[in-house]
Image: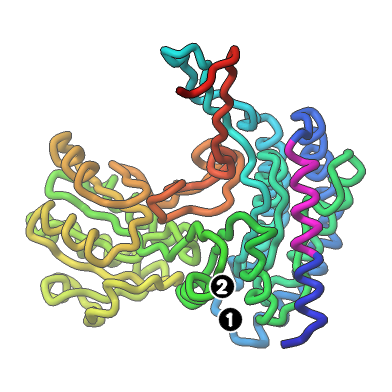
Amino acid sequence: MDSGLTQTIEVIGRQARAAADGLRGLSRSVKDAALVAIAARLRDQRVALQAANARDLDAGRAKGLSSAMLDRLALTDRRIDAMAEGLEVVATLPDPVGDITGQYVHPNGLRIAQIRQPIGVVGIIYESRPNVTADAAALCLKSGNACVLRGGSEAVHSNIAIADIFIEGAREAGVPDHALQIIRTTDRAAVGEMLKLDACIDVIIPRGGKGLIARIYDESRIPVIAHLDGICHTYIHADADPAMARSIAVNAKLQRPGVCNAMETLLVDAAVADTMLPPLADELRGAGCELRGCPATRKRIDCEEATEEDWGTEYLDKILAIRVVDSLEAAVAHINTYGSHHSDAIVTESYAAAERFLDAVDSATVYVNASTRFTDGFEFGMGAEIGISTNKLHWRGPMALEGLTTMKYVVRGTGQIRG
């Protein structure tokens, strides 16, 4: 192991721990002013950001990255504006630090309160999407956490450019030094060194593919809140409105296919498959989507045969698996068996069917008559997100400010002692 790399990562960890102590008491006004100033810097320096991003895009094309992956990587004017807007929205949100979530007086006179506190130091390991750099840094700052970021090699120049803008703006606004740090090397060994810093980092939040998540679970000495893959489903129920079903399915698959909340499997009730599938298949194919279907699907439309592997695959591309199911119960069974417990939807006019689906599907986010593409911190009114947790402990679903806090009990007495 490179001793220089080990030392570099250890220094980053110690600096983050020291910064976390200073952030804990930072006022909301300082945090909000910093976020607004950083948003302005992002807009003002878009030319430099896009120049750095162009280097990553050129390298991605040379490596043969798919069009969907290149789309995830690109920093368009619209996405830079969205990053800046996200920071400004976070600045307007209530500061969760110090919130009293519960309080009571014990029979012995002790006044006991449960209060939100920063976690401390958050390590975020992520791939592909450079906007994660800004979102993660903003949410950690607002929630009073120091953060250590390690982005993917495919976005290294973009991530560093965004982080440097954030660091400069935060320092000028009075935020403690090292509140945000980014690991600048693309050496994969840096991840392993980061995962050893249990004395400095309180939680690791990974965002990426199965290989990355598996490695982090295997190697981390630090608790992990996982953002796993998004094998998302849309189920067209027998009582679905045809126009609504087509609109939702097309949006869920094609609005942006390379993201975790895009639909990967379409389930269609056998009672409406004859009428629903052919026009929907035509629309999807017309937009360049490859279709793979079960035998019942292939009796109704021309498509490739779906294999068992397809039902558990996150394509992140214009590929869709389709299965005809005999009932709502069969749809739920498929989702709970093959899904990643991320986001799943039913399209139906039946209140009873909708309620059964909502109760039975074991996912972080479930929808009735809406696209799974809404599973997103910004779309949920959180300003941004640190990730979409598929864990069941600590947090589940889009994770933003409250998800980056923990609890402290504050107990006030008048001299009580335990007998």
Query: Which residue is nearer to you in this view: 250 or 314?
Result: 314
User: Where residue 307 sits: x, y (%)?
Assistant: 23, 81
Q: Residue furthest front?
A: 419
* Amino acid, disc 1: Leu
Range of magenta residues: 12-24
Q: Are marks 1 and 2 in contact (CB under 8 Å)?
A: yes
Residue 338 seen from this side: yes
Q: Is residue 261 left or right of residue 179?
A: left
Q: Position of residue 200 (x, y in %)?
A: 69, 59
- Name the spot of residue 371 as percent of width and height, x first: 37, 49
Query: Residue 65: which numbered mark, if any?
Result: 1
Vertical comparison of 102 with 328: above or below: above
Amino acid type at image mark 2: Met
Q: Residue lying furthest right in this view?
A: 172
Taken as a whole, is the magenta stretch helix, strand or loop? helix
* Magenta stretch: includes residue 245: no
Q: Which residue is disc 2 drawn over?
A: 69
Residue at (52%, 59%) from the top-left corner? 223
248 relative to 42 in the view: left or right = left
